[in-house]
Amino acid sequence: MNREIIQTYAKLVIVKGVNVQKGQTLLINADIDTVDMARACVEEAYKAGAKEVVVTYRDETIDRFHYQYQDLDTLTTVRDFQIASKLEYFEEGACILNLISRIPGILNGLDVEKVNKHLHAFALKSKKVREYTMLSKTQWCIAAVPNKQWAMQVFPNCKDEEEAVELLWKHILAAVYVDGEKDPIELWTKRDAVFAKRCQILNDFRFQSLYFTNSMGTDLRIGLVEGHLWAGGSEKTPQGISFNANMPTEEIFSVPDFHVAEGIVYASKPLLYNGSLIEDFWLSFEAGKVVDFDAKKGKEALSQLVNFDAGSCRLGEVALVPHNSPISQSGVLFLNTLFDENASCHLALGNAYPTCVENNDTLSEEDFARLGVNVSLVHEDFMFGTADMKVVGTLHDGKKVTIFENGNFVIE
Ligand code: ZN
Ligand code: ZN
């Protein structure tokens, strides 16, 4: 991809994504294949007034060697400085950008349980760090860049890696509205109004539950937390700085009541969970809890996810994405949740976003638990929306309102 376009993308991510403020420190976690984008982001961040930009690179291929050769004891030892290196900056007011370029299936064939134990140990220790993003205590953003292996998996019919990478670039840029002509920053600002309106409509209804059905066999009723709020598009830190956590984004989302989920849900897209691909799977729920599941591929990884901790077998997010969203219409299966979740209605197993509850700053942990706001060390989206998805909301007085018909909103 040419330099100029990458610079435009970087500026969008810095200005509308993480929205780094004058005098603020920006942390960048960058996958090794994002180096050109990372450099452009560092430059744009300084131009926007960043005091300091701290870049940490990650190499998934090296991670694979660690998982393969380290013993469990070493893998589950998390050093204090690994946490402090981020926490200290956050406490001083830093914001964070994650530049990802993942290789689907990179951990295939490894001992999933070993990988999981490492992730568990790390998640336990980094709870405070994670709160900065989970609770939007600072601005954060995730954006993606292609790599050869990823591109070849998405477009296996390309004649070579170069052609596949260019094609994946094209689709990534289209998904974030960078076309080399119109000003993407302006476009993102305009789209924000659409999200705000959708959220307002749903917030005014105050649904008690949602009922999802389609021809794949999904037949699922989920409760919503009392006082839930729908969110989407840009959000704000407690200091009132707006930012876009995901680039791209097409979803509006809220908090399900973790006590209430009944029925069965069929995934409509594969899920890449920590390097393992889970395909053709379903989950069935009783009283909010996963009671059975199966997958044609990756069942072991799915089992690790469901059994990760006490909260990972319950729902932490429900998101509505119209089937006519541009990413969905492109028909591309990105094999990456950042994109695929924006092509499809999705649910998340695990932790809920407490920011999606009214007056959340006055509520205690007990209040959240009583309301049904789920707690877990994981938060994993999986996609289940289809072109024929129907969503019906039930109000507290029992009245029913159709929200989605044939995969799209019907209440706008
Ligand atoms: Zn989501
Ligand atoms: Zn999510």
Image: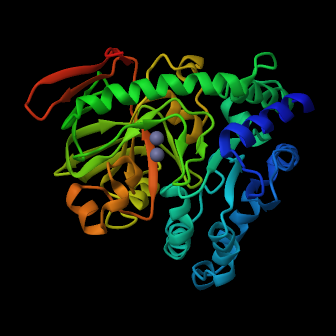
From this view, report whether residue 308 is shown above or below residue 251. below
Count up the numbered dots: 0
**Which colour assignment does the render follow?**
rainbow
* In-front residue for pair 184/57: 184
**Residue 264 visible from this viewpoint:** yes
* In-front residue for pair 383/150: 383
Q: Where's residue 252, x and y in %?
A: 43, 33
**Residue 353 visible from this viewpoint:** no
From this view, report whether residue 130 is shown above or below residue 165. below
Considering the image in quadrants, where does the N terminus appear? top right
* In-front residue for pair 309/46: 46
From this view, report whether residue 160 is shown above or below residue 137. above
Q: Residue at x 42, y 61 (%)?
A: 304
Q: Where's residue 40, x and y in %?
A: 87, 43
Left or right: residue 153 versus residue 383 is right
Considering the image in quadrants, where does the C terminus appear? top left
